[in-house]
Image (cartoon, rainbow, N blue to C red):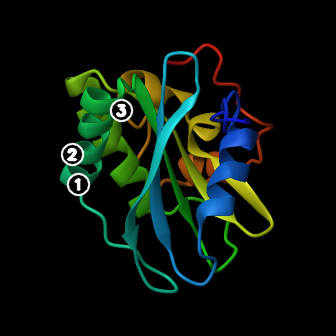
Amino acid sequence: MEQNVPPTILSSTEAANLARALMCIEQEELWILALAANKTLLASHLLFRGTADACLAHPRDVMRTAMRFACEKNAVGFLLAHNHPSGELTPSKEDWVFTQTIVSCGRLFQIPLVDHLVITPSGYTSMRSLNEALFLSGLLPEAPDSKVFLRRCRARPKSRSYLSQT
């Protein structure tokens, strides 16, 4: 008898492929993926489904689910993934502010946000790859609407490895 082996997520590319398979492409959705210490996927959950161009999410709902996964499934970290049905790969100012809040909450509860991915039908963006400092310190080095910050966000980094991350 063959058992389903949960996937191991070792990079942003693997996480994006998994998240894309879960998502509806017509509406914005926000998903949480819970990870074990060995980067095995423990659980995935649709947190919010929005409209064609917006998804209202609250940090307390994200953290409630992250804490539940930590307590019930022994998750040591989590990923967030949301889609942009418009096809725009660049994270919005709101995406950055929301991510900063979640990173801070995760640090407080010692359940780190490993990455936040923006998914489109044609690609993805790893917000961690664009701004490692945010995920390490919990702080955005520049305002999300500054020219320097926006220029950095337009860069297309390669796949981000999660091997050294919790």
Task: Determine the residue located farthest toward the top in the rendered image.
Answer: 164
Image quadrant holding the N terminus, namely top right
Local secondary structure at mark 1: helix
Q: Position of residue 134 (x, y in %)?
A: 44, 32
Local secondary structure at mark 2: helix
Q: Position of residue 100 (x, y in %)?
A: 35, 42
Which disc, if any, is residue 139? 3
Of the residues shown, which amino acid type is indicated by label 1?
Answer: Asp
For mark 2, what is the residue?
Answer: 64
| Distance (Cα) linking label 3 and label 1 | 21 Å
Q: Report whether 158 appears left or right of 75.
A: right
Between 30 and 108, the one nearer to me in the picture: 30
Local secondary structure at mark 3: loop
Q: Report whether 97 appears left or right of 10.
A: left
Residue at image point 49% right, 27% down? 133
| Distance (Cα) linking label 2 and label 1 | 5 Å
Between 21 and 97, the one nearer to me in the picture: 21
Of the residues shown, which amino acid type is indicated by label 2?
Answer: Arg
